[in-house]
Image (cartoon, rainbow, N blue to C red):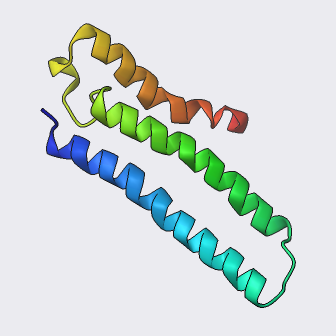
């Protein structure tokens, strides 16, 4: 089935964005209560959270069908392809730093 590392990876991939969403909702409610206008930082936080959704999907797919959390040698060839794609996709987002 799933290794304990796969379960931990998927759990973390789901729980942390949910916690962040709760914090964002709290911030927006506080802005509404104080009648403060949304500024650039609020929009940046929302845009960043949308990017975090991509990481959530990547973590769930990688942990459930991609083999993250299991030794590479134990994966069948088609799962190795998914594993390597899931592993390298966050690196693609950082190409702008090169």
Determine whether 20 is above or below 48 in the image. below
What is the total number of numbered labels drawn onto the structure image? 0
Quadrant containing the C terminus is top right
Query: Image quarter for residue 70?
Result: top left
Q: Which residue of the protein is positioned furthest toward the bottom in this rendering?
A: 34
Does residue 38 sit above or below 94 in this rendering?
below
Judging depth in this view, the residue of 23 and 89 nearest the camera is 23
Q: Position of residue 12 (x, y in %)?
A: 35, 54
Please state the horizontal and vertical placement of residue 3, each as a whole percent of the image. 15, 39
Q: Which residue is found at the position 76% from the left and 59% from the top?
A: 44
The structure residue drawn at horizontal position 32% and vertical position 46%, both measured from the top left corner, is 10
Picture quadrant of residue 1: top left
Q: Where is residue 60, by image quadrant?
A: top left
**Residue 40, position in %: x, y?**
85, 65
Q: Residue at x 45, y 22 (%)?
A: 85
The one nearer the camera, 42 or 35, is 35
Q: Is residue 18 above or below residue 26?
A: above
Looking at the image, residue 83 sits to the left or right of residue 22; the answer is left
Residue at the (51%, 42%) spot, across then down: 55
- Left or right of residue 73, residue 51 in this image: right
Q: Is residue 21 left or right of residue 46?
A: left
Q: Is residue 66 left or right of residue 16?
A: left
Residue farthest toward the left in the current orientation of the protein = 1
């Amino acid at each position: 089935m799933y290794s304990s590392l796969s379960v931990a990876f998927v759990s973390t991939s789901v729980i942390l964005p949910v916690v962040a969403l709760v914090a964002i909702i709290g911030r927006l409610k506080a802005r509404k209560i104080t009648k403060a206008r949304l500024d650039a930082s609020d929009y940046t936080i929302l845009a960043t959270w949308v990017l975090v959704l991509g990481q959530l999907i990547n973590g769930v797919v990688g942990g459930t069908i991609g083999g993250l959390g299991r030794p590479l040698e134990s994966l069948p060839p088609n799962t190795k392809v998914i594993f390597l794609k899931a592993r390298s996709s966050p690196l693609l987002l950082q190409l702008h730093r090169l």
